[in-house]
Amino acid sequence: METLVLTLNPLKPQTHLFSYQTHNRSRRLIPTISCKLSSQPSKDNKVVVPGAAPSLSEEVKPPPPPAAKNSGGGLLVKRLTKRVLLGLANLPLAIGEMFTIAGLMALGTAIDQGENPEYYFQKYPEDHPVLGFFTWRWILTLGFDHMFSSPVFLGTLILLGASLMACTYTTQIPMVKVARRWSFLHSANSIRKLEYSDSLPKASVQDLGVVLSGAGYEVFLKGPSLYAFKGLAGRFAPIGVHIALLLIMAGGTYSATGSFKGSVTVPQGLNFVMGDVLGPNGFLSTPTEAFNTEVRVIRFYMDYYDSGEVSQFHTDLSLFDINGKEVMRKTVSVNDPLRYEGVTIYQTDWGISALQVLKDDEGPYNLAVAPLTVNGDKKLYGSFLPIGNAESTDVKGISMLLRDLQSVVLYDQDGKFVGVRRPNSKLPIEINGTKIEIVDAIGSSGLDMKTDPGVPIVYAGFGALMLTTCISYLSHTQIWALQDGTTVVVGGKTNRAKFEFPDKMNRLLDRVPEINEQSDVICG
């Protein structure tokens, strides 16, 4: 049977003239327009809508015949694998895994991490268990002192990752395959059973295809049948969300098991090697060439409020490679770290390591400074300058107290207050017959160092998660139509925005021209 090809090309010879009027579903007055069609025989029995209808060779081919059944052992393994995948893809199980991970993370926040066992012996003793049962044995046995690299936490993460992959394989990928497979409905009753259905009297399915193509739909035509869809990316988005979550978990796991961390307090003017400070966090921790880098504390200084309190502290750092060549220099401060070849150095603390004094114009002498225990979070440091016979069992001398690098408070050998001097003020003070001058107060910089190789993976995962979450809001819409005489039966469905879908369909169908004269070119 010969099939006609309808085109809207005005350059070809015109053989038929028809009068069209758009379907006014809202009963508005639409001016009549004219459209000339040309018809010609089609040798390959196809119906084509310019710019919308592909060749029928693109139609989905029937599935190949089923392969021969596997042997009994292979069939058993296949069934067992399917059961395991379906079990892992269970939604309540995945939700339970996520709540378990959230609970473990909260517990890891409540329990101080990375402390010595003695710390947990004292804080979680067996004679006073928390909640009546929780003691140090739970923490050390389950590895909760290193929660985010503990077998319990990592095992739960792996189980959640397996659930995501199983859900993707058993649910999301088949749904995408079904969505990509286009097919025609050859029964008007089947179309009327869809979520949305309507009829266009005196209309052409080819004209409907043109309207849908202009609205961004992919249109397929075969004889009197039409299939169109758009928003297929919304079907791929859940797979992308799962992949993004897997990236985040993989990056977090890599950070927990493959990073290094360490802390050091270095007096001004001294050096240290990165590798001597950094310690591995897990079995995947691998040192790099940057660990041979030497760090020198060039200068440490502090900023103060008008009240005298410390507002900020800074450390001028210089980095040298294994050959002694300076490779980087930067002044770090709180919230302004140094980053070098995957190693990050944070300014986290400060201290006072020594006092330089002149005694009777001799020196300078470096006096050791020790932190003193006081109530509250205020820092206090003390030093002592012996006077007289240092070998005596009853050594007396001058005591000095410091709260910061701004000033030194001095006391005589009887413990009486004598005065206050600023470092480098060049103002000597006489105490018990000894002239003392404070030359300098040498600060110590408290630095935290770490490597975190999983950070780029985590950032990539969060970026992909935001993108795929937005894409998932795209509606995947499918439309079927059938030419039934001079009437076009139209139906469709969508996975999102179901309440707005009928209005959108009505607006599209309002644009389909109405044929006012009978014609034999309408496929039926």
Image (spheres, rainbow, N blue to C red):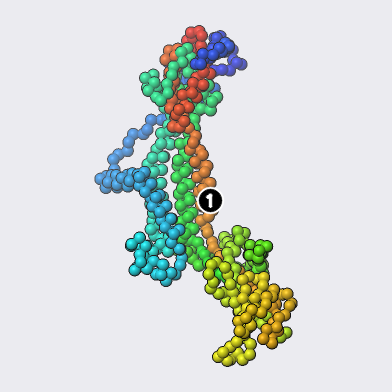
Q: Which residue is label 1 attached to? A: 459
**In the image as oriented, which residue stretches furthest toward the left?**
72
Image location of residue 449, percent across then percent down: 56, 64
Position of residue 111 relative to residue 91, above or below, is: below
Q: How many numbered marks, from 0 up?
A: 1
Q: Is residue 50 above or below residue 442?
A: above
Q: Residue furthest top?
A: 517
Nearest the camera: 517 or 46? 517
Residue at 61% across / 84% down in the picture? 414
Percent x, y of residue 16: 55, 9
Residue reaching furthest right?
426
Horizontal and vertical percent for residue 166? 38, 45
Type of amino acid under label 1: Tyr
Residue 394 visible within the image? yes
**Rendered view: 101 above or below 448:** above
Kindly give the residue lying farthest to the front in the view shown: 416
Residue plotted at (47% across, 59% down): 256
Q: Identify the residue at horizontal 39%, vertical 60% (top origin).
A: 151
- Quadrant position of residue 421: bottom right
| Residue 161 spot, x, y in % from top left | 41, 50
Q: Is residue 15 left or right of residue 71?
A: right
Q: Residues within 10 Å of mark 1 (few under 14, many from 20)?
A: some
- Of 248 and 305, nearer the camera is 305
Res. 2 in view: no
